[in-house]
Amino acid sequence: MNRNYKTSSITESAMITGILVIISYLSSFFSVIMFFYPAPAIILAKRKGLKYAGLSLIASDLIISMLLGVQTGLIFFILYTPLAIALAYGICKDKEANRTILYGTASYLISFVILIFLMDLIIGVNFIQQLKDIYSESFEMMKEMLNNYPAGLAGDRVEEMKKTIEEIGPMMISTISLMFP
């Protein structure tokens, strides 16, 4: 391999690493920007190859961990690095668009499940229990709001809504328990 090509590839990887770190820093203020994190790595993979894109992503994850904290670095490493590698692989190998999107979706879903299990293991936050608590609290708040509704305005409709909430509430909580292992 030509030494000039290696030098330009490493230089371009370093620039993309810097862009990835900037995107991750900006995403701490504007969370929508977080979804643009894979874009520079995809461009690098198409131009220089998947190896340089992977190295750039790993280097940016290490720098993110040093600058923004280990938790943020882990989130980017677990959620967005596999997504970027999967999308870059699909684009680099000239796969059709649907297959590339399937690769990205599958990697993101698997990464999300891994992140949930790691949160439960490391931090002690049980995601499923949190969802159950949120739903039960929201149903209780809805019932409380309906109890405070003026009696003369729509009494029969309010009672019907209360009955519906009392029927649907436990079903929703059990559905959440069954939906997530």
Image (cartoon, grey):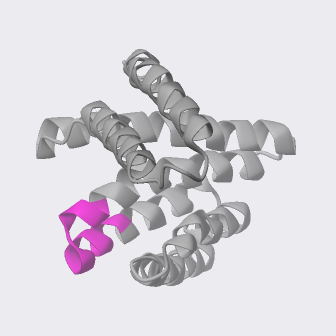
Task: Answer above or below: position of 179 versus 40.
Answer: above
Query: Which residue is at 27% across, 38% downward?
Result: 133
In the image, the segment drawn in magenta is 61-73
Spot occupied by residue 165 in the image (x, y as percentages of width and height): 48, 31
Query: Which residue is at 39% across, 21% downward?
Result: 170
Q: Main secondary structure of the magenta part?
A: helix
Query: Which residue is at 31% across, 73% downward?
Result: 64
Task: Answer above or below: position of 69 versus 19.
Answer: above
Spot occupied by residue 70 in the image (x, y as percentages of width and height): 20, 64
**Is 17 colored magenta in this rendering?**
no
Q: Indicate left or right for 151 with 113 as reference.
A: right
Q: Is residue 66 visible?
A: yes
Spot occupied by residue 173 in the image (x, y as percentages of width and height): 39, 25
Task: Answer above or below: position of 159 versus 150.
Answer: above
Q: Which of 37 and 174 is in front in this view?
A: 174
Query: Which residue is at 25% across, 32% downward?
Result: 129
